[in-house]
Amino acid sequence: MIRNLLLFHLGAVERLALLAGLVVLAGLLFLMGLSSAWLGHLLPSSADWLAAHEATGRIISAVLITIVLFINWQLLRLLPHRTQILGVWVELFVLLMLFFYSFNLSIPFIGRKIGFLITQGAVTTLYISAISIAIATLIALAGAIAKLSSNGVVFGLVTFYTSLFRGLPLLMQIYLIYLGLPQVGYVISAVPAGIMALSLCYGAYMTEIFRAGIESIPRGQSEGATALGLSPAQTMALVILPQAMRVIIPPTGNQFIAMLKDSSLVSVLGVWELMYLARTQGQTEFRHIEMLITASMIYWLLSVGLEFGQARLEKRFGKAHVR
């Protein structure tokens, strides 16, 4: 009896919380200035009345959208877990496409330019990002080992490096490398300058990630490896790092995705990467928004690819911890 009573009250609390959430959602939609024009398109006979009663129309619009969202929520909950995820993705993607459609985009213009954006811009972006990711990973591994060293000189060097490159904006680092190195007699072209800036910047951030991952492994692991006769290098490569990767991969994957997007800053040097071409190609016919949206979708697809790779790596290195 007491258990049933508690369940009843719990259900009542949940219903009240749901009702409060719906009221808050409707209020937010109203305060955001949600237009009731879509109701006029669905019901042409009500267009004049809605135009004359704007505030009331906004309230009705907010309430109707809230009801539709609630019904959609309940229907999605009836589906299996994987289908729920797929359904949410499909619905949100359709809403995103409708949002872009409202910009009155020129699809033929996008069709003429998208091939060049992919073959030249996206390829250059991937080239710069891939090399930068590889170099940054090596820098991070070396920096993490140096930060764990008892050598004061090595520790001082790596802490100065991480402090400097984490403290300066990436755009400033690009300019300092591209414009500053020639002042000391080393002339560097735009693409290597961009790769160097990205590698040094993200290597500094990833150094702390690798250090934290290595330190997360219990000391007994290295002591056991030493007892088995493994050298420090073998211990790090065969014992510590394989276990630390489970901790290192998620934040490192985020850094890779951030680097992919930050590679657009190299466009200030005139590199024909994705963002640079999106800006210049849009200027030819004053179709800036078409090119920017197209470039954003390409960036998103590239990020999804990195997310998929990150998930596979997490699954591989996390097998020992699956119950």
Image: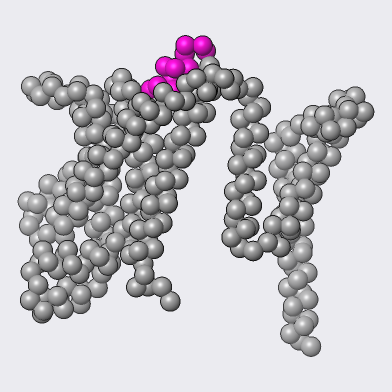
Residue 280 is a magenta residue: yes
Tell me residue 21's x, y (percent): 72, 54
Q: Main secondary structure of the magenta part?
A: helix
Q: Is residue 132 left or right of residue 56?
A: left
* Residue positioned 41% across, 23% down in the render: 116
Q: Is residue 257 left or right of residue 54?
A: left
Q: Looking at the image, which is closer to me, 181 or 102?
A: 102
Residue 234 is a magenta residue: no
Whether residue 168 is visible, yes or no, is: no
In the displayed structure, 301 sits above or below 319; it is above
Count up the numbered dots. 0
Residue range (magenta): 276-286
Whether residue 202 is visible, yes or no, is: yes
In the displayed structure, 13 sits above or below 27; it is below
Tell me residue 128's x, y (percent): 28, 34
In the displayed structure, 283 sits above or below 292; it is above
In the displayed structure, 296 sits above or below 226; it is above
* Residue positioned 27% across, 49% down in the render: 206
Q: Quadrant of the C terminus?
A: bottom left
* Residue positioned 80% across, 38% down in the render: 61
Q: Quadrant of the N terminus?
A: bottom right
